[in-house]
Image (cartoon, rainbow, N blue to C red):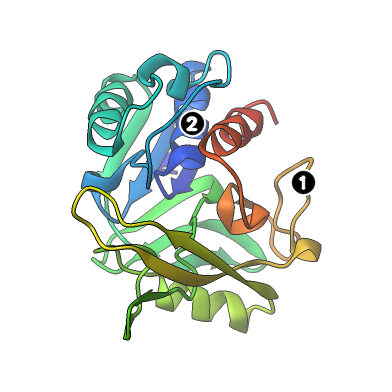
Amino acid sequence: MDYEVLIIGAGFAGSEAAYALAQKGVRVGLMTQSLDTVFLPFTAVARPFPPGSLLEQVGEDGLKGWELHRRAKYRLEAQPNIHLYQSSASRLLLEGSVVVGVETWEGPRKRAAKTVLALGSFLNPQLHIGSVTETAGRLSEVAYPELYQQLLELGFAFVPQQAEVPAQGGSPGYRVTYCTFAPEEWEPQTFRLRRLEGLYGLGLCVLGTGTYAQMSREGMRLATR
């Protein structure tokens, strides 16, 4: 195995889970489609932050996206037991009904004892800016179309969601429609996605909505399971 735990998605939930697990000595792979968007918020963060969290260590009231991203990425890259890297998961790697990692768009397979999907708003997303619509989870960030299609083929059910981001810092406001796992697919106490062994869901893609602090708490909670 490449990792004990492989986390797909380096937003608030995925990054917090990776950071907390690594501090316990767990060998973690933290895969993101873009290293430029690790731990990057849509809007400024504000206290209270979860005690002991990565967000508490790098955040402060009113801190905006790029500075928070820079601080958090530095901590994640410096943390022993975390391999933070850029790649795009295209399909789950299966052995029967057990998930043993992922296939990537670039080619290499990554294997792990446990695979965590922390995909945020990137399952079947459509980004709407005025009259323009494109397939993206937020500005300049692509979706996971092949992975979503495989999950559908495996029988997973989803529910539609919607989020709006106001104009800020020279960027236009926009609306995103996306899918999250249906409630019956996920066990909140264990984080398991019930249809397959070795597969877990974390953060926005299972909760639907939540604040940055809530996503951080969920990542920390997963590390205790």
Q: In the rendered structure, which amino acid carries the disc numbered 2?
A: Glu
Write the residue at 63% across / 51% down: 200
Residue 78 spot, x, y in % from top left = 27, 20
Residue 90 appears in view = no
Q: In the rendered structure, which amino acid carries the disc numbered 1?
A: Pro
Q: Nearer the viewer, residue 134 or 224?
A: 134
Quarter holding the C terminus is top right
Write the residue at 49% across / 64% down: 93
Write the residue at 30% across / 21% down: 75
Write the residue at 45% across / 44% down: 1
Question: Residue most toward the left?
Answer: 170
The disc label shown at residue 120, or none: none
Q: Nearer the viewer, residue 177 or 32?
A: 177
* Badge 1 vs badge 2, beta-carbon distance below 8 Å: no
The disc label shown at residue 16, or none: 2
Q: CA distance from mark 1 to mark 2?
A: 17 Å
- Element assignment for label 2: helix
Other residues around mark 1 within 10 Å, as few (<14) / some (14–19) / many (≥20): some
Quadrant of the rendered image containing residue 51:
top right
Q: Nearer the viewer, residue 15 or 63?
A: 63
Other residues around mark 2 within 10 Å, as few (<14) / some (14–19) / many (≥20): many
The disc label shown at residue 188, or none: 1
